[in-house]
Amino acid sequence: MRYFLPLIVGCALLGFWEFYVAYAEIPKFVLPPPSAIGAALVNNFAGLIDASLVTLRITGFAFFWAMVSGLGLAVIFTRARAVELAFYPYVVTLQVTPVVAIAPLILIWVGFDNVETAMVIIAWIVAFFPVLTNSVQGLRSIDGQLHDLMTLSRANSWQRLLYLEIPAALPAILTGAKISAGLALIGAVVAEFVAGSGASTGLAWRIIEAGNRLEIATMFAALFLLSVLGIGIFYLLSFIEWLALRRWHESFQD
């Protein structure tokens, strides 16, 4: 039932969509029916898949660096309070600044010969903050008695980090990772929009290109693939979370 009910609702919505477009005689360049979108997906499948791989590559690199930098900085912040007080306001400033406003500057600074690197940086800015905040929260919420136990065991700083802090903070870290992965995809799309013609070959540019040609069905097909990418990334990380926590975390116990 968990998967059957959403499938029924989805099929019903698609059926209503197909019926309403035909009944209201809505032009296909305004709102194409699902059948036209499916045909556009089949006819442009190779090009859309290639574009999907470009977007996925940018998303993957941005997410990787968001995890590395966010977790690394979280460890530093929880180890050195003065460092956190000094740098956290700038981290927040970077997060709340609209990425669309600074994306052209990043493209100029990095150079148009390195457009993909610039797009990864733009997506990284969007994806970085959830990893940092969730990791800091997880590392700071560890039971003090466990720290006392590590002290009695004469554990050094690295042993505390590897055998206590990271395992105990893992639920919060993985929650941040799921949020960050979705934001990395959004950041990749924004970066592709900003990069413009000839510089990006991802799904976002295919959407712009199709819109300029009034190929609305192709636009919807590209949007569908973007949704599939986002859902796939979310469920992949959810599966990793389940593998990592199912044996001991209470949220996965029956």
Image (cartoon, rainbow, N blue to C red):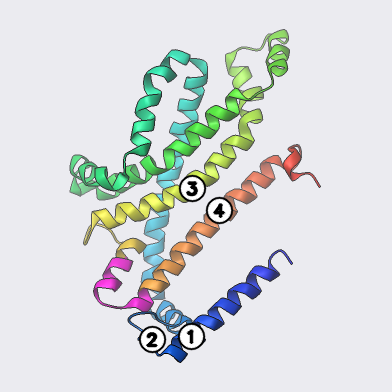
Which one is earlier in the sequence, the residue at label 4 or at label 1?
1
C-alpha separation, residue under disc 2 versus residue under disc 4: 34 Å
Label 3 – label 2 distance at C-alpha: 36 Å
In which quarter of the view is residue 205 placed? bottom left
Does residue 25 appear in the picture of this structure?
A: yes
Give the x, y percent position of residue 142.
Answer: 65, 23
Residue occupied by mark 4:
234
Which residue is labeled 1 in the image?
20
Q: Say the numbered circle drawn on residue 102.
A: none
Mark found first going from the N terminus, 4 or 3:
3
| Contact between labelled residues 1 and 4, with CB atoms less than 8 Å apart | no
Give the residue displayed 51% in from the left and 23% down from the top.
Answer: 75
Q: Amino acid at mark 2?
A: Ile
Residue 26 numbered mark, or none: 2
Q: Are marks 3 and 2 in contact (CB under 8 Å)?
A: no
Q: Which residue is mark 3?
A: 181
Question: Is 96 inside the magenta-drawn segment?
Answer: no
Which circle's residue, 2 or 1, is located before the other in the chain?
A: 1
Residue under the point 60% across and 21% down: 161
Q: Is residue 133 above or below residue 158?
A: below
Three-letter code for the amino acid on which mark 1 is drawn: Tyr
Q: Residues within 10 Å of mark 2 (few under 14, many from 20)?
A: few
Residue at x 56% of width, y 77% of height: 13
Q: Which residues are magenta?
A: 206-218
In this view of the protein, can residue 65 be seen by the observer? no
Location of residue 118 in the rendering, given as x and y in whole percent from the top left corner: 28, 45
Q: Quadrant of residue 73?
A: top left
Answer whether labels 2 and 1 touch (C-beta < 8 Å).
Answer: yes
* Alpha carbons under labels 2 and 1: distance apart: 8 Å
